[in-house]
Image: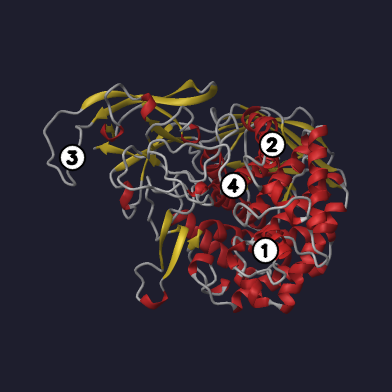
Amino acid sequence: MTATASSDRSPTLRPLTAKESRWSSGFWHDVADRTYRTTVPNMWEDFRNEGVSPAWRNFLIAVGERDGEHEGPPFLDGDLYKWLEAAISQLEVAPEAWLREAIDSCIALIASAQREDGYIHTATLIARRRDPEAAELADRFHFETYNHGHLISAAVRHHQVTGETSFLDIARRAAQFLVHLATDKPLELARSAICPSHYMAVVDLYRATGDEQYRELAEAFVQVRDEFRGGDDNQDRLPVREQCVAAGHAVRANYLYAGLADLIAETGDAELQQVLETIWSDVVDRKMYVTGGCGALYDGASPDGYPWQGEISRVHQSYGRAYQLPNTTAHNETCANIGMILWSERMLALTGQARYADVIERVAYNSLLSGVSLDGSEFCYTNPLRQVRDLPFPLRMPGDTALRPIPDPPPSDARLRQRYMACFCCPPNVARTLARFHERAASAGPDGLWIHLYGGSASAVNLGEGRRLGIEEVSDYPWDGRIQLTVTEAGETPMALHLRIPGWATGATATVAGEAVAVESGSYLRLERVWSPGDQVVLDLPMPVRMLRGNRLAEEITNQVAFVRGPLVYAVESHDLPDGVMLEQIGVRRDAYFAAHEGQIDGHRVTELRGEGVLLPPPGPGLYNDITDEALEPVALRLVPYFAWGNRGPGEMSVWMPVAW
């Protein structure tokens, strides 16, 4: 047997299908079950309920079955398509009769609404029923290409799961409309490339059909974008090959770079890959929150503070300057965090480097799961790292901004998840991500099986010529770092098994059939041998409670610390503070000891951290106040996983706490 750290060569990894990989037990199995049992059916109920959502009604009006005007944001069509992708993914692993009926009814209605030229956008179709002059792409913020992209992705997924072509034919017609734009209206296409899901979508379509025109269409998207001069908010002020930092709207950025990574996988464009690696490092090393959240700013100006003042443009929901990471006003849209998973998994497939899987894990366990309640029924649009009472300004609820008039936001310590929100882009994105999250557990490489994420998976690959390998992983991850992997099937020729050793897992150990092998954190352990059913590999990933501090340039977290254990970030909630103790009074000593304990939140099992903090004197009422000489008193603290905060009603919360040196 050979046991080595995997090299940095580019292996071109292929994600596994549901037939090859499932969450068979453990943490992610429970999340998947919750998604299928609650999230997906609830969302379908809400889309069909006109008292809750206008999504379904908009399509009925567009096809002439109902009278009325378009309601809701222009990207609402895409939200229905994202739900449809989630439902199709559920159909593959947990089929139910109602699910198939719902999917078929959606496809039939979409087919009825689509024009002969492939265009479909209910807002425009409804407007044209009253005004024949109403034109497509009249406003770049109508999100038409975004909607077409999500339609195509859902249709490709339907073809993969069912083998049918009814929805795929709709997607091909939609793609032909995009071909028409790239050929005849390139300026309009470039201007309308907002949240460019269509980059990823047409590569999906190319892979599903083998039709070269769709790969060429993806290349055309880049060309017309480079010829258009826009602004930082949409990442089109500079040609993509001249970009070196992440700027502007974080969802748009992460979707764009994920789509470009898809194109690289098909073209082998090394120059463009280097561009993406540079921008990705800018995000992870200087702009990403400890939770994996992306997009610090509600609003801002970009480039902010640069010498060429004439080129400043407005940005929103965006990446800020390097190390600009506010906590209370952190935006961190759930869609942006999902976009980071999409981008990182594509970079992982291109490179086989563990750092990309480490980021996927960080986002997944923290800023993805924080976007949905523990019961799977309510959702966050933003994911702040601190929530406090009595903010002296109305911090808007982005999920409400499609309402007219826009309602006043709730009290600043009562910003909770919602079952439905007027801007509903994030919830179905969560649904489709979690409904097929098993595909992110492992990959097939040229030499064997790669395991990226732990949490109860069963995976198997067959590379042909007798090279096959099946692995079942049993663990209590992320609560415990002991991971047992058992070979369930194997061929008669050597196969490589690559196991990710997380970057945080200092001191990790591994044994193969009881024999110790050397491991290196932040890499893949490569084990190659002739495997036999019953062979066991055991990983022990130490999970001490760690206390982190920020970079000296991250002003908002100066002299503060955050607690992490394994892949999980922790937070303190006011629900767990003694009576009369306020959040701003909580601090910790640098040598504080916190231990892991079994706990529950709203009936859901978690591992919590318990230890002793210090009670800081209450701050004065002024902007600046004198330091007092009061002694620091001890206070018992309970910290909960960040993803679980906000499940017990209104209250305050903070990831970062002052440190008493």
Q: Are marks 4 and 1 in contact (CB under 8 Å)?
A: no
Q: Are marks 2 and 4 in contact (CB under 8 Å)?
A: no
Q: Mark 1 points at which residue?
A: 145
Residue 621, numbered circle: 3
Element carrying mark 1: helix
Element carrying mark 2: helix
| Dot placed on the residue nearer the N-terminal end, 3 or 4 | 4
Element carrying mark 4: loop
Q: Where is residue 262 in the image (x, y as percent from the top left)?
A: 68, 60
Question: In the depicted view, which residue is nearer to us: 151 or 360?
Answer: 151
| Dot placed on the residue nearer the N-terminal end, 1 or 3 | 1
Q: Name the residue under label 2.
A: 45
Give the residue type that dot 2 points to. Answer: Glu
Quadrant that contains the N terminus = top right
- Give the quadrant of residue 25: top right
- At 49% from the left edge and 52% from the top edge, which residue is drawn? 294
